[in-house]
């Protein structure tokens, strides 16, 4: 059969549909990826609620995927110059088209803010081809960056999935010192990956404020030393809890990964004077919130760093971690749930409700 | 005559009074400084309005001063180990008592947040002795850090005064690159010193949003390339103005030195993606203000750094700059106005209204 | 009995002797520490061979020790302001007297280069009192920085001992990223601690070149991924080995901890272009060695950082690590051997020959 | 006339010859640059002596040039997205072909070590086309990065020329603080640009050790505070001179720009403890030299940074500086000498002898 099935999001709020696409012809440097698994993440929820700008609906969601290279036209090499072959099991960086030549790329070295930057499954839509992972096959455009994976099983990589490069970028920007107490706000996939990466990076203790209870149990399982349910404690209690665990000073480093704008001022209040806050959970616009510039920032001599996206280096390091069981076992504690293409809408609903830790689309699952 | 006159602030809102103090006996390591000039700055205005915490009223204000060492008990050495002598013309670091032993000093290396830290003229009061500069003489406690100055005249140092170490700390924390466009919010003494220091540090262009008009003229005189009056333009116009001058991107670096909490979110909006904001103007609590964590911080991949106080290294570098006419001439463009001890209240009122660029107490001016 | 026994090093090359000292009277702020264990380290070997400058022989060696506070005159508080009590089990920072006021301390913030800095057991001699750990009791001068330890047993702390703060400083200066391949030159106590700390700090793989074989086995046990005996392979083979394990590029980060000056150029050659080398093993002068500024440094765009001493923050973090079995178990794999005071000379000889991994003086062991 | 004249270096040691080339056909994205001026620099001397690796002789030297775009095929845009036009006066980054995709580019972010990187006039030879500046016309390959210049005259840009991006990279890597004393070793074009950039970046004083006398006079003219002739003083005297001018401590920052490998150890010895050395003068292999790892590096807690090449950001900032007379006037103090194409060999000889400060090829000068 020559038709390719994909789950399409026609527009904000509209139900996900299965559509058929013809087999595309390949340009030189392009390849087809037969999808093994593709992620359903918080970004997809935002896409469905219409909260992201510049999305060319209809789109095939799914920005982080693993699969098998089923066809390559011309030569495809990895970052070490090794040639990739048909049949290789790979993942690819969802970010594509970063130009390397504009002012942000070439002068500011801030490539995640390149205006040419596109993201498979987010800012590439159906018009751009089979450019999302909730499909039987993805069309990998020329210059897409693939990494060949040697793993015990495909889930290994997806347990980190799209949250891991984001978490690695945030933790890199956090500059944790050996011995620091790190606070993580949020216990979704990004929060959980940040907990693990903070421990890998030398944190003495990691505290987590998140929810619901099942996710907090996972937070403790992957290594957090203490966890507090934000649904059961008011902000002042949460801040007090952190201070009690840190000699009254607050955390050395706080990483915010909640999606809730009020968490940003809370992050500042939970952090010790001359500490550091990384804000990585505010990927969509939820409006303005209040903060106190004197008490929360200036008098504290605090440093607050926004963190947007990830680049190839983070994706590369994510693949390194996941290819080594010493590291990947920590992520294997995060429960995964598979959905068929036909059930992509249900997967999305489950992620929106926080019912699943992490949902995956498996296009080989029977559709009915 | 053995009585020492000083201008005393009895409490918030109360008029400044002249009081007489007896000549104190010196401990070993202490010294008496016969005041030549002492500054009246924005902090003193805040002290008078009761906006600073932990102030032990009544106090003798005046934290940055120059004068002549009139008496030394024991040995007093400078940072290079050179012995200071009676008759030397010196200034001293207003910060005293930083312990070097607490967790903030010894583990976090964040000495400006040491809980033992005291400031002459601010957190030392009359109970602590002659510990402020609006007086004929200051009692320099043991371990006070003096620097001997060789200057054409006393005003040279005071033109930088207490704003310069603060500005040096802020500019150091801003990490300007050669070629950057720097935006300074505020045109008071700290703002003006930041303009000059940003240029010294390699800024290609410095823009200033401040007021009133006379201060903006001074901003241009000391080197700003363009200036905008915040009283005559709304926030959106100000932000638009910055973007027009920066290829639509915003400033590479913004330093906030206004005292107005709404300036902090404005600083973020005036700065380019992946740029940096230093907040140094929020020394007192003016309550909460709104900002947008997604648009102002996370999506911009922005870095925001609070900056509190200064340490000896900033004071030392300030004295270096002021001892070299290549640098001090830039500050000599800032108009100074002298007041007698008796007119300290008038000086304070003038600074509160922004009428003077910088007011100085000269205890040798006739009192009547 | 009121006499205190100590092992004294009368001068370079002279045999260690047991001497008796009278019980000293305590100044205010001083304390007596009844020694439980004190370390015999490479520095002591250098002291005995006369390779260190400014050593006031005769000295009581032993700079890192643990013991029980047997007497306190006045109040002794720790860094968190908690009062220490007689009977507490503590260690103390061997560095004492850093002035906080000189140019290096106050302007350069380079406190390990303070000219006033003294080290117990190294630059304090018998003239300065009971100022070394190879003794029944140490006299802790006022301003000595103690940390109270809660440990399963005294060995726990000494397994890190004096090597750990040094290693923490070096690893902090190395700025390892998650995923890096780290090369450690040297497998003595500092090298072993660097291996563990590099893993704690996110290294993906740690390679070790050292010897003899027993130490390399320990290197592998504490987490190194591969080890090579420098006695059995020439420099070119060693460099080739590293390149083979790193896609031909060299290690991302190399930490030199050997004591052999030729290891410094080798470190550069084993490191990838734009990587980083930290030199922490050159504590004594072994003369000049050749290197190639073009090939080893400039063309490689390499960064080489000397690392001298440690400060309280490193000691504090060392104590944190050792107070937590998650971390201390890694160090517990390093074999320790105890010697009586009388056998201090034998301990020294054993360390000099690399026969013991780490030797400790236990003044409670029977002397005969 | 349709023939293009160029000065060709046939191989190491062989005389420069004038050759004629046919007018090439342009690929899409390529352009022809009618050369106004092209530089003769130290690299060209090294090329002629055969000291650089991977040079595809015969070559047309001349890596930094200015000229007029005489023909553009397709669209050519600058970094801000503005379209360049035929007739525009431009310069271009000599580095070409950095891939953005290899491990050095994409993971290490060390683009100056990209193996694909090529340099006009150095690693592009006659086989690659008209790829050097000592010619009437340069063929600008697609993806060459041009900057449009608005200058009073062409010399303005060339006074910085190829030394300025190199100097900017080195000074950026030096992380000078306001108030630092900077030592520059070398007074050739790179050394002189480093002197000016160090002052722009906040150095309080810049010392220079170089030669011959005429260049030292220029060093003082562009802002150095003191200069010493290395031909007239031995190394020990030079080191002593620096210490005398720096309270016996050494320079805070030293930048080496000499080409002489013995200058690297000297740079370490002239720098204060915990200071920083940037090595930017070792572009060719002059063999091994001795240094003392204990005294020169480890005990000093010194940081030594190699610095290779420059990227577009440095070139962009160089063009910014030269487009503003506030900055360019400093460089205009460096004497330039023009040579015809026919006299390129004489220009090279003059630069080799240090007779000219800076030599330029002007292809419009009459040949005879």
Image (tube, coloured by chain):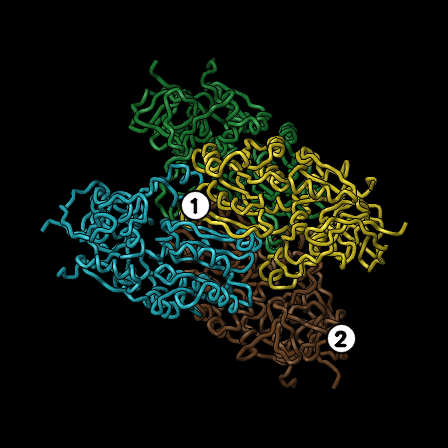
Chain colours: A brown, B green, C cyan, D yellow
Provide the residue designation for mark 1.
B110
Q: Camera-side residue: C115 or B109?
A: C115
- Alpha-carbon neighbours of circle 2 within 10 Å: few (<14), some, or many (≥20)? some
Give the Cα distance between marks 2 and 1: 58 Å
Q: In this view, does A31 lie above or below B13?
A: below
Q: Position of residue C62 (x, y in %)?
A: 26, 53
SS state under label 2: loop
Please report the residue visible at 55 percent of the width from the left and 50 percent of the height from the top.
Answer: D306
What mark, if any, has residue C162 been given in the picture? none
Query: Chain under label 2?
Result: A
Please report the residue visible at 48 percent of the width from the left and 18 percent of the height from the top.
Answer: B340
Q: Camera-side residue: C276 or B39?
A: C276
- Alpha-carbon neighbours of circle 1 within 10 Å: few (<14), some, or many (≥20)? some
Q: Are marks 2 and 1 on the same chain?
A: no
SS state under label 1: loop
Provide the residue designation for mark 2.
A26
Closer to the eye: label 2 or 1: 2
Q: Camera-side residue: B147 or A211?
A: B147
Query: Chain under label 1?
Result: B
Left or right of residue B366: residue D86? right
Kindly tell me whether residue D256 is visible in this rendering: yes
Q: Position of residue C165 (x, y in %)?
A: 36, 55
């Amino acid at each position: 059969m020559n038709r390719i099935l994909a789950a399409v999001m026609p527009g904000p709020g509209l139900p996900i549909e299965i559509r058929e696409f013809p087999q595309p012809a390949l340009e030189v440097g392009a390849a087809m990826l037969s999808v093994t698994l593709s992620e359903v993440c918080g970004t997809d929820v935002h896409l469905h609620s219409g909260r992201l700008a510049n999305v060319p609906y209809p789109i095939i969601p799914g920005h982080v995927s693993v699969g098998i290279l089923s066809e390559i036209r011309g030569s495809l090499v990895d970052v070490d110059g090794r040639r990739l072959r048909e049949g290789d099991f790979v993942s690819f960086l969802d970010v594509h088209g970063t130009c390397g030549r504009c002012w942000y790329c070439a002068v500011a070295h801030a490539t995640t803010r390149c205006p040419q930057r596109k993201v498979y499954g987010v800012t590439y839509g159906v018009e751009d081809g089979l450019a999302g992972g909730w499909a039987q096959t993805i069309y990998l455009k020329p210059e897409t960056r693939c990494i060949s994976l040697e793993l015990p099983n495909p889930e290994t990589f997806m347990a980190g999935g799209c949250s891991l490069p984001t978490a690695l970028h945030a933790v890199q920007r956090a500059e944790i010192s050996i011995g620091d107490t790190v606070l993580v706000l949020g216990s979704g996939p990004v929060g959980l990956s940040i907990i693990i990466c903070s421990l890998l990076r030398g944190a003495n203790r990691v505290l987590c404020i998140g929810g619901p209870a099942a996710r907090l149990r996972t937070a403790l399982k992957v290594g957090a030393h203490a966890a507090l349910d934000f649904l059961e404690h008011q902000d002042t209690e949460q801040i007090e809890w952190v201070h009690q665990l840190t000699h009254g000073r607050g955390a050395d480093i706080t990483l915010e990964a909640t999606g809730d704008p009020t968490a940003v001022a809370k992050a500042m209040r939970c952090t010790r004077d001359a500490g550091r806050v990384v804000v990585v959970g505010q990927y969509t616009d939820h409006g303005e919130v209040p903060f106190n510039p004197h008490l929360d920032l200036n008098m504290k001599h605090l440093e607050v760093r926004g963190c947007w996206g990830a680049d190839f280096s983070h994706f590369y390091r994510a693949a390194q971690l996941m290819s080594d069981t010493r590291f990947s076992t920590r992520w294997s504690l995060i429960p995964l749930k598979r959905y068929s293409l036909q059930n992509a809408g249900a997967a999305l609903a489950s992620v929106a409700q926080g019912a699943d830790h992490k949902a995956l689309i498996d296009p080989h699952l029977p559709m009915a």
